[in-house]
């Protein structure tokens, strides 16, 4: 079963790390990614840009409008996410607990209920 694991963060958190600490955390995250890529359970790991670089697209009467955004009510945003394919929820939770940044922020584990056809 596939799961999406989401880590939330904010600029204040990232800026609280010294350059050395941040590199150490990134190395730990890279080791995590390699470990689960080798088991075949990690399908992808993605870090998102800062929320200030995000755009919002709305379509009204068939006309798209693009604006800066999102305008967050909190400082936190989806900082990164993972797509895993595991035997079940228990394994997904085990992997989520090993994510290095989980020691700084909670992570969410979402079951994937539908997958788009691959075009075949």
Image: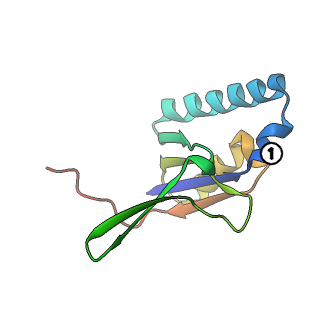
Q: Is residue 23 above or below residue 101?
A: above
Q: Position of residue 76 (x, y in %)?
A: 71, 57
Q: Position of residue 87 (x, y in %)?
A: 48, 54
**Residue nearer the viewer, 23 or 88:** 23
Image check: 74 left or right of 112? right
**Residue nearer the viewer, 39 or 42:** 42
* Crowd class of label 1 (few under 14; some 14 to 19; many from 20; radius 10 Å): few
Element type at mark 1: helix
Q: Residue at x 81, y 38 (%)?
A: 15
**Residue nearer the viewer, 62 or 78:** 62
Q: Residue at x 63, y 45 (%)?
A: 50
Q: Position of residue 21 (x, y in %)?
A: 83, 27
**Residue nearer the viewer, 41 or 101:** 101
User: What residue would you read off at disc 1?
Assistant: 13
- In this orientation, does residue 80 appear? no
Q: How is the image coloured?
A: rainbow
Q: Is residue 20 above or below residue 72?
A: above
Q: Is residue 67 above or below residue 22?
A: below
Q: Residue at x 66, y 33 (%)?
A: 29
- In this orientation, does residue 57 appear? yes
Q: Position of residue 110 (x, y in %)?
A: 54, 63
């Amino acid at each position: 079963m596939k799961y999406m694991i989401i880590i939330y963060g904010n600029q204040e958190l990232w800026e609280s790390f010294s350059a050395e600490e941040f590199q150490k955390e990134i190395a730990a995250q890279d080791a995590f990614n390699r470990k689960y890529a080798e088991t075949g359970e990690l399908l992808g790991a993605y870090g998102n840009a800062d929320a200030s670089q995000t755009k919002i697209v709305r379509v009204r009467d068939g006309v798209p409008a693009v604006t800066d955004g999102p305008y967050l009510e909190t400082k936190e945003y989806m900082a990164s996410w993972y797509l895993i394919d595991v035997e079940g929820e228990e394994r997904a939770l085990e992997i989520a607990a090993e994510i290095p940044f989980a020691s700084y922020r909670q992570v969410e584990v979402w079951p994937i209920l539908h997958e788009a056809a691959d075009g075949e």
